[in-house]
Image: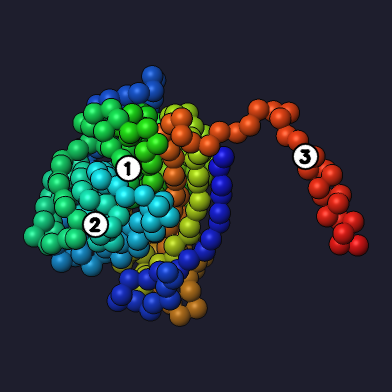
Amino acid sequence: MVLKVFRMMQICPSRLFVNSRRYASTIVSEIPGAFIVFDRVAKTRQKNRAALDMESSRQVDYLKDEVAYRIVDRLLDIKREFKTVVDLGSGSGHIIKHLDQDIVKELIMCDMSEKALERDKDIGYKVEVERKVVDEESLPFEENSLDAVISSLSLHWVNDLPGAFIQIRRSLKPDGVFIGALFGGDTLFELRTSLQLAETEREGGISPRVSPMTDVRDLGSLLSRAGFTLTTVDLDDIVVNYPSMFELMQDLRAMGESNAVLTRRPFLKRDTMLAAAAIYKELYGNPEGTIPATFQILYVIGWKPDVSQPKPKPRGSAQTSLKEILEKSGSEEQ
């Protein structure tokens, strides 16, 4: 069963006006013939560079911290104590900020960027922490070894997403849970549109400036294809206001979220950049002069199959007709 819930949220970084509420794998490919879209080496460099600038990196934690809070909120809905949980693509540690020992006994923080893992290593947390340099496309965990796997805003950079889901499912114990958050296909649509229009006008064509991302309609089937059961998908739109397009791109760089498409162009001409900023403000600008940036967040939950889980009854085994119930309800209301 796939549940889709659509909500609109707003969150802004602290230096701005705040109106907030609470595609194949380069190493392991589980899916034959999958495509390599992202440059994983470049992405590692981007994340390392971002983490080395500690001050700037911490200033842009606002988005990942908020999504991590919402992930942990979903974990709290599961009335269970988790002994060993993996935070896959943990970055500097966004999930652990919201955990305590009543929920999780040990958290294994895994990321492809060693510098990101080490950024906040001197900070004490309420949960026992182990840090591992791990490529999300090649998981080192034994089969049936983990109580839960969490991934917050990391798997959108994985080439073989179905293969990653399969590896996660294998590493979970029976009835173990996977909870993830990924950027969805409408993320930064304002920036994508503005850059495409500016490049078409100034350079006579377009290039991939914003990475391709997963569509909400595909995630449920991908989870089922990977062997998960009792799957759930829901969606949030988080809108962040920035003074201009340039501050948005600066924050993305500081987050380690710069473009890492394998076929990306290495630079953007100055006049194209200025044209894109003007188009952005003209098409999407707010009345007070800021510009909005939409981050579409796709949340997924999937369980590793186990005999203890509820199963649907066989077709035709129902003893009561839904039609009769509806007709009876309608007659009582009259």
Query: Seen in the image, is 118 located left or right of residue 135?
Result: left
Q: How is the image coloured?
A: rainbow
Alpha carbon separation for disc pair 1 and 2:
15 Å
- For mark 1, what is the residue? 148
SS at circle 2: loop
SS at circle 3: loop
Tag on residue 178?
A: none
Q: Indicate which disc, 1 or 2, sits on the residue closer to the N terminus.
A: 2
Q: How would you rate the neighbour count of disc 3 (Cα within 10 Å): few for under 14, some for 14-19, many for 20 or more?
A: few
Disc 1 marks a residue whose amino acid type is: Ala
- For mark 3, what is the residue? 320
- For mark 2, what is the residue? 101
Which residue is drawn at the image coordinates 50% and 78% (left, top)?
A: 287
Where in the figure is residue 16, as x and y percent of width and height?
A: 34, 76
Q: Nearer the viewer, residue 82 or 189?
A: 82
Q: Indicate which disc, 3 or 1, sits on the residue closer to the N terminus.
A: 1
73 over 82 or under it: above or below? below
